[in-house]
């Protein structure tokens, strides 16, 4: 098997050029491993070789990124690297940003694998965790041994294309992508352990950190609803009987656009729900219960609304990924805007 | 309240002329079970099949899974208020055919849900690939309403499990475990120095095939209430739901509620496990507000310092989970939540339909949208005709070579939110 060719990126401090007073040094190339590269090389053993090391001062990189980055990429490319390892940067902020920037550029522009390591609070972690695998390290170089232990196996998997496990298994910082794993203890046991730790005031790690929830503020009221064109949109899965678009009963991958022209009432046997998340009996008997076409028609006739828009959009909201829902809406909202729809009644279940 | 569970291990299941248990083998007379089930005029036919761990067998759709148990001492009988006469259970002695299960299948009402693979890639996701399964294939009479159909199929599984459980009545258990919860004040005297802990179980109650029954009462119609945790071991709570089978609790899981068992394992050492509170997950906002108010109120009234809250289902009930989290936390009580995730097939979407800052201690049972390829099986009990329309399936997900692609949400018990399994996500 061919050895993996690694280029290692480090700063002036880890290259033992100097501390803050030498942070202005521009990029330079050294053959073989330097400083922490020696421990890395040992961890890889015979499977990989650090062919060279790029060194750059942290101030220089951050103040002259547009010059430093292409120069560094050229060095990595010239060395014929399969893999770029940057840092680890621990809690050094500018170094972290440099490691993240170089690693992401190596992936995006050179098309090679890249990995780095940082303390979770390093500003570079927030900036790059979604783009680059960042090994979670301690907050100082005292954590070098631990970091190298996790870095080398994950780097090998990246290069070989083996499946990457969950962040807690591999030791990288969560990337905002949820990955399944089998734990040693069943969920109930883990919950009890977490409760005991919480009661005692000990550290514990939640398995699902709450996201910044996307709450949408309602629009101001429509000024003159009696003249507005109103559309009906639903995540309640109302579809023509037989579900012609084959919308899934859960985690829908599509939505339907259905013509309501001349339809005064959604009747049994002609309309039904495709939704798998609630008792369908009542919606199947009278789909207006979820998508109130009958009432909208009455209001149209009474002049309470201007008109009901000709088409309705329907999907199944049951376990459907928010990302999919957003994509559906991005698409059909264009037609609603184009057709001068002024208000949408969005029914859920 | 004190209950002894006597375990009789079962490591094989076979058909025989006489139903009995011998040397860890469960012998089943299929005709007896058929006769029993057909006493219900709503059932037109029933077949019995066996499925053992490691076999090339798929059971789908799955309505419920039930553990054979029998009450040998103490008041009441199994599944009180549903099959046995209503009577408070949870004390005395109960015998368990450990390792055996009754599985119900057949065309189920509107939805066809749930897959149990006894071998292959799917087997590790369902706990019922490890049990010796007696499978009932049930057909209802024509013209039954959906709700009547659901009742008939539900009762057939429970009755068959009771019939098999009865075989354990006179047997000598290999092991006996004792579980005891004292009345609140006595418990405080005995464990006064330990933190007071409770378990809040949220029961699925969103309607047909999304219901749960407590002593025969539809959980939609309960107000949150208190149980001795041993009551569930005698079948106080039974399942009437199976849609999105990954995170619904079959009756088997209620009988063996793992949170109850894990709390008992550390009771008297790390905390005082005082009580179990059950609440529901109705679809109306007023019900959600009322039930979460009552749940927090009961936690406060019992003087609890910490609780585990388990969800059942996803989406709409995520709002109940967050209301419970917020209101319990506002009482100054520490909570750990147990849920699963719907983060999309690529894992990059928001996992729950709601969030709250108080939910800072969450155990995840995994991302139910993960796609898995299941191999074709030599034998299918039930029918594969529905794998394209079950929750977690999609149109044309069955390949020409017989393999099936589904999200793990289609697999019975894959992301159990009472933490029955080992799956998680990060």
Image (cartoon, coloured by chain):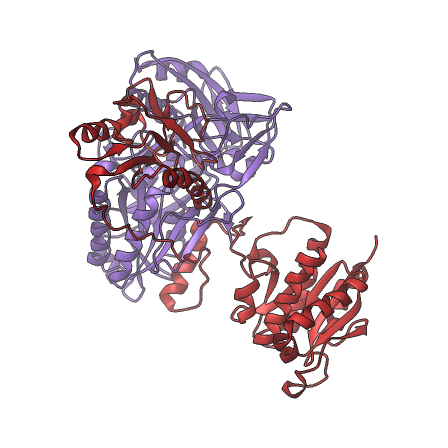
**A219 above or below A66?**
above
The quarter of the picture where residue B269 lies is bottom left
Residue farthest to the left, as pictured = A302
Viewer-proximal residue, B370 or B40? Answer: B370
Task: Answer left or right for A207 relative to A232.
Answer: right
Numbered disc total = 0
Give the drawing colour for chain B: purple
Left-right relation of A16 to B83: right
Q: Residue A235's quadrant in the figure? A: top left
Left or right: residue A123 versus residue B225 is: right
Q: Residue at x 32, y 52 (%)?
A: B322
User: Residue B23 in the image: x percent, y percent?
Assistant: 52, 30
Front residue of this view, candidates B275 and B400? B400
Viewer-proximal residue among B387 and A318: A318
Residue B224 pos. (x, y %): 22, 45
Q: Where is residue A311 shown, x and y percent of the image?
A: 35, 30
Q: Position of residue B140 (x, y in %)?
A: 36, 15
Residue sitting at x 36%, y 17%: B37
Asked if residue A22 is positioned above or below residue A168 in the image, the reply reads below
Towards the viewer: B264 or B250? B250
Whether residue B225 can be seen here: no
The quarter holding residue A222 reads top left
Answer whether residue A56 is visible to the viewer in this image: yes
Which tint is chain A? red
């Amino acid at each position: 098997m061919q050895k993996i060719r690694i280029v290692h990126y480090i700063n002036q401090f880890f290259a033992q050029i100097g501390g803050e007073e030498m942070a202005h040094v521009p990029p330079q190339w050294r053959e073989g491993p330097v400083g922490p590269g020696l421990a890395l090389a040992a961890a890889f053993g015979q499977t990989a070789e650090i062919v060279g090391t790029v060194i750059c001062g942290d101030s220089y990189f951050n103040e002259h990124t547009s010059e430093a980055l292409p120069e560094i990429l050229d060095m990595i490319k010239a060395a014929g690297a399969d893999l770029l390892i940057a840092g680890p940067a621990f809690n050094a902020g500018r170094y972290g940003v440099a490691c993240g920037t170089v690693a992401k550029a190596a992936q995006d522009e050179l098309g090679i694998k890249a990995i780095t390591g940082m303390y979770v609070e390093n500003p570079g972690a927030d900036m790059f965790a979604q783009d680059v695998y960042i090994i979670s390290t301690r907050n100082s170089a005292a954590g070098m041994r631990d970091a190298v232990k996790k870095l080398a196996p994950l780097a090998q998997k990246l290069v070989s294309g083996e499946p990457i496990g969950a962040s807690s298994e591999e030791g990288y910082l969560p990337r905002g992508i949820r990955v399944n794993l089998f734990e040693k203890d069943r969920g109930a046991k883990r919950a009890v352990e977490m409760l005991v730790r919480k009661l005692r005031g000990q550290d514990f790690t939640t398995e699902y950190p709450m996201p910044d929830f996307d709450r949408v503020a309602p629009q101001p009221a429509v000024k003159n609803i009696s003249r507005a064109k109103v559309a009906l949109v639903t995540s309640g899965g109302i579809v023509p009987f037989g579900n012609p678009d084959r919308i899934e009963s859960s985690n829908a991958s599509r939505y339907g656009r259905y013509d309501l022209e001349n339809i005064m009432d959604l009747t049994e046997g002609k309309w039904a729900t495709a939704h798998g998340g609630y008792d369908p009996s009542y919606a199947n008997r009278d789909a207006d219960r979820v998508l109130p076409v009958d009432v909208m028609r009455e209001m149209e006739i009474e002049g309470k609304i201007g008109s009901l828009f000709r088409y309705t959009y329907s999907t199944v909201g049951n376990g459907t990924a928010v990302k999919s829902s957003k994509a559906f809406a991005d698409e059909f909202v264009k037609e609603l805007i184009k057709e001068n729809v002024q208000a949408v009644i969005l029914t859920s279940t | 309240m004190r209950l002894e569970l006597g375990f009789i291990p079962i490591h094989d299941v076979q058909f025989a002329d006489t139903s009995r248990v011998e040397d860890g083998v469960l012998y089943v007379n299929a005709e007896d079970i058929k006769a029993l089930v057909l006493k219900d005029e709503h059932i037109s036919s029933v077949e019995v099949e066996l499925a053992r761990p490691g076999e090339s067998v798929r059971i789908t759709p799955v309505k419920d899974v039930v553990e054979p148990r029998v009450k040998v001492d103490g008041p009441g009988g199994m599944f009180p208020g549903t099959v046995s006469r209503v009577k408070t259970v949870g004390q005395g002695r109960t015998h368990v055919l450990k390792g055996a299960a009754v599985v119900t299948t057949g065309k189920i009402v509107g939805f066809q849900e749930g897959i149990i693979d006894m071998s292959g890639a799917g087997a590790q996701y369902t706990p019922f690939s490890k049990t010796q399964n007696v499978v009932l294939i049930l057909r209802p009479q024509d013209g039954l309403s959906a709700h009547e159909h659901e009742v008939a199929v539900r009762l057939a599984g429970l009755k068959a499990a009771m019939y098999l459980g009865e075989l354990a009545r006179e047997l000598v258990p290999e092991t006996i475990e004792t579980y005891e919860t004292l009345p609140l004040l006595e418990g405080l005297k005995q464990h006064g120095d330990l933190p007071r802990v409770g378990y809040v179980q949220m029961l699925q109650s969103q309607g047909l095939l999304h219901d749960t029954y407590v002593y025969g009462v539809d959980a939609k119609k309960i107000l949150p209430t208190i149980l001795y945790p041993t009551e569930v071991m005698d079948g106080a709570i039974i399942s009437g739901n199976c849609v999105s089978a990954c995170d619904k609790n079959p009756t088997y899981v209620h009988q063996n509620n793992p949170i109850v068992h894990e709390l008992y394992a550390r009771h008297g050492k790390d905390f005082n496990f005082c009580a179990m509170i059950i609440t529901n997950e109705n679809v109306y906002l007023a019900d959600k507000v009322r039930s979460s108010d009552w749940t927090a109120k009961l936690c406060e009234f019992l003087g609890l310092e910490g609780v585990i809250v388990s969800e059942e289902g996803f989406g709409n009930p995520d709002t109940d989970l967050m209301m419970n989290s917020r209101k319990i936390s506002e009482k100054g009580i520490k909570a750990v939540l147990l849920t699963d995730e719907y983060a999309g097939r690529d894992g990059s979407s928001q996992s729950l339909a709601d969030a709250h800052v108080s939910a800072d201690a969450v155990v995840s049972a995994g991302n139910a949208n993960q796609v898995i390829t299941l191999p074709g099986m030599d034998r299918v009990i039930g029918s594969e005709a529905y794998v394209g329309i079950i929750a977690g399936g999609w149109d044309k997900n069955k390949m020409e070579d017989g393999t099936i692609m589904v999200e793990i949400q289609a697999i019975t018990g894959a992301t159990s939110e009472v933490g029955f399994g080992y799956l998680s996500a990060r």
